[in-house]
Image: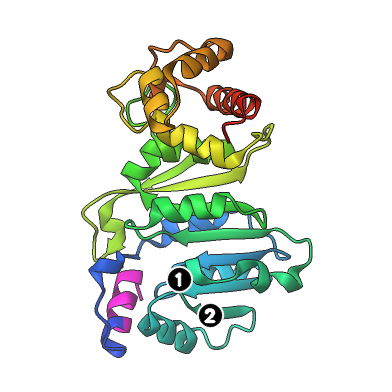
Amino acid sequence: MKLKERIRYLFEKYNFSPNLSLSQNFLIDPKIASRIVEEAGLKREDSVLEVGAGTGVLTSYLVERAKKVWAVEIDERLCRILKDELSDRENLEVICKDIIHLDLKKLFSDSGKEKIKVVGNLPYHVASFLLLHFARENWWDIMLFTIQREVADKLLSPPGDKKRGVLTVLMSYYTDMERVIDIPPQAFYPPPRVSSTVVRIRKRKITPVKDEKLFTSTVKAAFSSKRKILLNSIAKGLNLPRGLTREVLIKSGISEKKRAEELKIEDFIRISNLLLERKVASKCC
């Protein structure tokens, strides 16, 4: 039975209809499903967290390759399908919960020092939030996410690209990202209105900022008004004197007339660290 026919069969069997508000579009291309699992580089001793397991298309591939699979699904109707259709898989644990409210450190407590691989089809409406939420954690080894192509283009945009934004910089601070494959709408059922992209994400080795909260605030301030030059956007966004902001930019070796999308991740790190020094020196924080 072809995957599309299989999905339709499950819909009818369980009286299920997709909830478009949850971005429920299900992969029906077996070649792409197989490719995603291959790109995750799974070994038999690996443990996997699957985000948004849906009807279990990817899940069925993952349980064949991995030692343990935690399949997380927010929709109770889909959880029933997963539990019924994959009940014979002893290495599968279906968790019917919002991934955001799941204590993942506790979930993986029995895994010891083992790093978890993450695979998932992120709902378009929460993809940006989930990406950054995961990027800041340390328990994972590699992540392979299917996301809206527009989001992927923003994530992978280089300095100077107008698509570059806050998410681009923050994700680039925590991780290294690469495009794996673009997926057309017809590879899903029902087909979404947009194309998708599979992105592979790994932890990035970089000198940490001195104050992560200030770094994040600096990046957000810089992008708060793309039409403004860096001097104005940072000064206004952080409520800092223009003179202090100008001094920091000069010391950072960055023109005050540049715009946020032109900066490299290292530029933001220098600005943030120098701002912290000036704030501490002036006892303003």
Res. 60 in view: no
Q: Nearer the viewer, residue 197 or 266?
A: 266
Say whether residue 23 is magenta.
no
Q: Which residue is mark 1?
A: 53
The residue positioned 30% from the left and 68% from the top of the image is 22
Question: Seen from this angle, which residue lies furthest front?
Answer: 283
Q: Is residue 14 left or right of residue 282?
A: left
Say whether residue 7 is magenta.
yes
- The amino acid on which the numbered mark 2 sits, given as a three-letter code, is Val
Q: Considering the image in quadrants, where does the C terminus appear?
A: top right
Q: Which residues are magenta?
A: 1-10
Give the x, y percent position of residue 210: 66, 34
Q: Earlier in the sequence, mark 1 or mark 2?
A: 1
Say few, some or many: other residues with alpha carbon within 10 Å of mark 2 (under 14 / 14 to 19 / 20 or more): some
Give the x, y percent position of residue 184: 29, 50
Say few, some or many: other residues with alpha carbon within 10 Å of mark 1 (under 14 / 14 to 19 / 20 or more): many
Give the numbered dot on residue 94: 2
Q: Quadrant of residue 149?
A: top left
Give the numbered dot on residue 243: none
Secondary structure mainly formed by the magenta segment: helix
Question: Seen from this angle, which residue lies furthest left?
Answer: 193
Asked which colour scheme the image uses, the reply is: rainbow
The residue positioned 42% from the left and 18% from the top of the image is 242
- The amino acid on which the numbered mark 1 sits, given as a three-letter code, is Ala
Give the x, y percent position of residue 62: 56, 67
Res. 182 in view: yes
Q: Considering the image in quadrants, where does the N terminus appear?
A: bottom left
Task: Label 2: state its secondary structure.
Answer: strand
Task: Label 1: state its secondary structure.
Answer: loop
Q: Nearer the viewer, residue 276 or 50?
A: 276
Marks 1 and 2 sit apart, C-alpha to C-alpha, by 9 Å
The residue positioned 64% from the left and 25% from the top of the image is 277
